[in-house]
Each structure stands twice: as C-alpha cells, then as structure tokens.
Amino acid sequence: MAAPPPTFRRHAALALCLGSVVAFTLGAPTAGSADPKPSEAELRADLVKLNKKVDALIENYAATRESLGKAEKGEAVARQNLRRAEEVYGENERQVDAIIQLQYQSGIGGLPSLLFSEDLSGAALMEQLAAEQSARLKGFAESVERRRKAAETAARLADEIAKEAKEVQEQREKAEDVIEDIKNKIDRLITQGSGRRSDGSWAPQLPVGADNITDRTRIMRDAIRKRFDLPYSVGCYRAENDGGEHPLGRACDFMMSAGGSMPSAANLRLGDEIAAWALKNKARLGVKYVIWRQRINHGSGWRGMSNRGGVTANHFDHPHISMY
C-alpha cells in the first residue's frame, strides 16, 4: 500500500492535536464524579488554543483546495492533449491506409512489385512515404500512451486531494462546533446585570464612575469587550440630549468602522454577531433594545426604522445597545 502524501500526514497530525484539545476542553466525566465546571479564564484559554487549530485547518484546507485546482487543471490539459494525439494518430493511420490502397490500385501487385517496376522513382517514393508514415504512427502511438498515463495520474491525484480537502473541512467543522460550545459556556458565566428585582424587572440606576454610565451598562459593555475582538472604539455616555439613553448612561455604540464609512463585510458580520449576542442575553444583562443597520429589536424581532440621512445616523456603522 502506498504511503500517504505529506499533506495527508500533516492533516492527520492536526486532527490528532484537535482531538486532544477537544477532549481536554469538553472533558469526560468519570463514574461517580460531577461534570467539570471550568472557570471563565480556563474556557478562554481553551478558546485561544482552538482558534489557533481552526486557523491551521483553514490554512491547510486552502492549500488542499489550491492543489486540487492545479490537479484538476493538469487533468484537463492531459485529457485535451490525449484527444489531440488520438486525432492526429487517426489522421496518420488514414494516410497509411491510403498509401496501401494506392499500391494495390497501381495494378503492379503492391509494394514488392513497385520496387521492380520500370518506374523506380515512383516505387522509391511510395516506399519512403510508407516508412515515414509508419515511423510517425509509432511515435504518435507512444505519445498517446504517455498522455493517457498522465491523464490517469492527474485524475488519481485530483481524487486524493479532494478526499484530503473533505477531511480537513470536516475537522474544521468539528473544531468550530467545539468553539461554539465553549462560547456558550462562557456566555453562561457572564456576570448578571445588576439591579434586577425579584419579579424580574430592573431597578433604575444612576450613572456612576468616570465614564458616566450605569453599573448595568458597564457590565454589558465589558462583557462584549471580552466576548468579541472589537475593531474600533466603544462610545457610551454622550451629553447631547437626543431623547435616547446615551445622556442617561444607559447605552453604548460599538463602532464597526470609522469616519462614517460603511463597515467591511467582515465587520458587518461582526456587528450581526454582537447584535444577536446582546439579544440572546437580553434577560440576563438587562438589555432594553438593540439598533443595527436601520432596524430596531426589542426582543421580539427586527423592524425597520425611518431614514435619518446617513450611515452613522442609520446605525449602519455600529450596533447600538440600550439598557433598562
């Protein structure tokens, strides 16, 4: 049995490492013992390790996809060359057949008779043509065989690389599932918003501290800072009284771009994730509503808002989170 290619061995090593991290992260409860309850710091450390594994898997997946593309291109070229060689081979074969027919149509009894006929120049020419065509046929036959083998090799390589790419993709999906599980565990460990009454309602709070925001707003802001890799600043308190929660210290804007420009595709996805996360943890944190991309959500679904005339005014460059 042939040894697996180097890329496959690298993927196997990555899979082994991934399996170790997954086992370490999720744990396996032993008989008579309670499920492990890792701390937030431990979960975040595991998250960093897994993200590095996923990055490596993504890199290898991209490499195998690139190799697959090259192999498929090589296969296509080999098959095209094979078709051309077969066409030329067939044409030369027809030419030799035509020469043989001419020999018999001469009425002298074929090539041996032509050699002893009075028209020796014609016989010599026929003999030379036949020899040349036979040599060309032999060369093309060998070329056809080489190209056929090349096409088979390219097809086999493409199949092997496609299998590797599938395996790496499966490993990546498993790692991402584990990452999502860790994130859910971290979410369950976030500090509950302060000032919650026994009936589930939220007591009013005054802004405190140098940042002029409520304690409940601060808990939400800090939780999002820890949960997400934010690309730009976070703005909370604003003195301008615009009828919203900013001057009350009960709202934060999580910027996804600067200078009033539209965010990149990646940062739009990040904004989507932050908005979804805030709504998911609405009851735990005390979120009142979220505004993002000219829509508002109080926890019962998104609805459109009127056009306020700009990227920032319409909240296309930042999710806005208001608190009770």
Image (cartoon, rainbow, N blue to C red):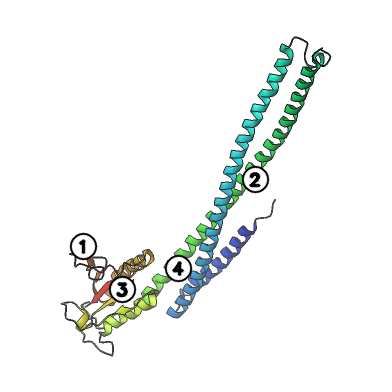
Residue count near mark 2 (Cα–Cα under 10 Å), binned few <14, some 14–19, many ≥20: some
Nearest-to-viewer mark from 4 and 3: 3
- Evaluate if marks 3 and 1 touch, with contact meaning CB atoms under 8 Å apart: no
Which numbered disc flags the more N-terminal residue, 4 or 3?
Answer: 4
Distance, label 1 to label 4, CA atoms, is 31 Å
Residue to which mark 1 is pinned: 303
Residue to which mark 3 is pinned: 259
Distance, label 4 to label 3, CA atoms, is 33 Å
Looking at the image, residue 104 lies above or below residue 179: above
Tell me the amino acid under the disc marked 3.
Answer: Gly
Nearest-to-viewer mark from 2 and 3: 3
Residue at the image point whose x is 58% and y is 49% from the top: 71
Residue count near mark 1 (Cα–Cα under 10 Å), binned few <14, some 14–19, many ≥20: few
Which numbered disc flags the more N-terminal residue, 2 or 1?
Answer: 2
Say which quadrant the C terminus sits in. Answer: bottom left
Q: Is residue 181 visible?
A: yes
Which numbered disc flags the more N-terminal residue, 4 or 2?
Answer: 2
Distance, label 2 to label 1, CA atoms, is 57 Å
Q: Return the residue nearer the eye: 185 or 120.
A: 120
Q: Residue furthest right?
A: 116
- Evaluate if marks 1 and 4 touch, with contact meaning CB atoms under 8 Å apart: no
Q: Which mark is residue 153?
A: 2
Residue count near mark 3 (Cα–Cα under 10 Å), binned few <14, some 14–19, many ≥20: few
- Evaluate if marks 4 and 3 touch, with contact meaning CB atoms under 8 Å apart: no
Which numbered disc flags the more N-terminal residue, 3 or 1?
Answer: 3
- Evaluate if marks 2 and 1 touch, with contact meaning CB atoms under 8 Å apart: no
Nearest-to-viewer mark from 1 and 4: 1
Residue to which mark 4 is pinned: 179
